[in-house]
Amino acid sequence: MNASLYLVPTPIGNLKDITLRALEVLQEAGLILAEDTRTSGKLLKHYEIATPMRSYHMHNEHKATAAIVAQMQAGQTVAMISDAGTPGISDPGFLLVREALAAGLQVECLPGATALIPALAASGLPCERFVFEGFLPVKKGRTTRLESLKEESRTMVFYESPHKLLKTLTQFEELFGGDRKAAAARELTKLHEEIVRGSLSEIKRHFETKAPKGEFVLVVAGAS
Ligand code: SAM
């Protein structure tokens, strides 16, 4: 263990999607920071990991960060996990990484599960260059963000919740045109995994007849 802080990716559905090294780091760390200790508790129990766990999430990260940095400076090795996927990717992580680096500590992120890469790679759309947009702003700044993507020529990747999916697809149709190629990847690695590929209009029609359920990644081709 060379680093003070390890970002450790955890499964996005299928519990088997965790690396041997991730399990080793979680086992050997002095403390695990988890977004939701109940959710992560199930994963740790499954792998019989008994490392002490503390909650660290968007509502307490500003308060908690300085004390955690001090603990790491005193020699504690910390592993950070989020509810699913890679910490820092549309999840808490950035603040602690920034402060740990500012304090001269070593930070590592293990490679592993994240939703955007499998969605992009299986979309059938060009993936040698892409932009990850995460969640679009819900209200303030949404139109500006969308407008800024109008001329984007790289493949675009978005995270979306099921109840906003149709609204977002409608806005994408208006912005990019209904013929633009796209893919909606749903419930990746889970029982009801589904990837719907086609034009934006076709994908929207699909989810108008079959109500969107579960977690979604939207992949949209860039302007040609
Ligand atoms: N840190 C995570 C990662 O590395 O992908 C992302 C966390 S973000 C709070 C949750 C969003 O990721 C969901 O709303 C969805 O857009 C996407 N996501 C997570 N798991 C997914 C899955 N199994 N299938 C499709 N999308 C998923």
Image (cartoon, rainbow, N blue to C red):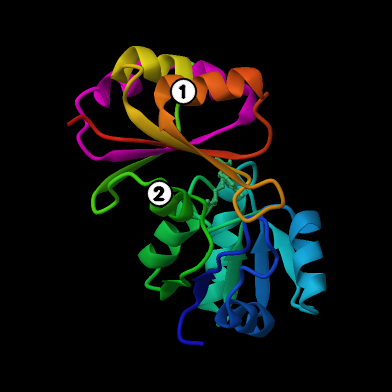
Looking at the image, is 152 positioned above or below residue 205? below
Q: Give the range drawn in magenta.
A: 140-168
Q: Nearer the viewer, residue 195 or 222?
A: 195
Asked whether residue 153 is drawn in magenta, I would say yes
**What residue lies at 52% left-to-right and 72% top-to-bottom?**
6
Kind of residue at disc 1: Glu
* Label 2 environment density (alpha carbons within 10 Å; few <14, some 14–19, many ≥20): many
Q: Can residue 138 be seen in this view?
A: no
Give the residue at mark 2.
120
* Label 1 environment density (alpha carbons within 10 Å; few <14, some 14–19, many ≥20): some
Q: Is mark 2 on a helix, strand or loop?
A: helix
Q: Which of 152 and 57 is in front in this view?
A: 152
**What residue lies at 59% left-to-right and 71% top-to-bottom?**
79
Q: Where is residue 209 in the image (x, y as percent from the top left)?
A: 64, 19
Give the residue at mark 1.
202
Kind of residue at disc 2: Leu
Q: In the displayed orientation, state which residue is furthest to the top.
A: 174
On the picture, is 46 further left or further right than 185?
right
Asked whether residue 145 is drawn in magenta, I would say yes
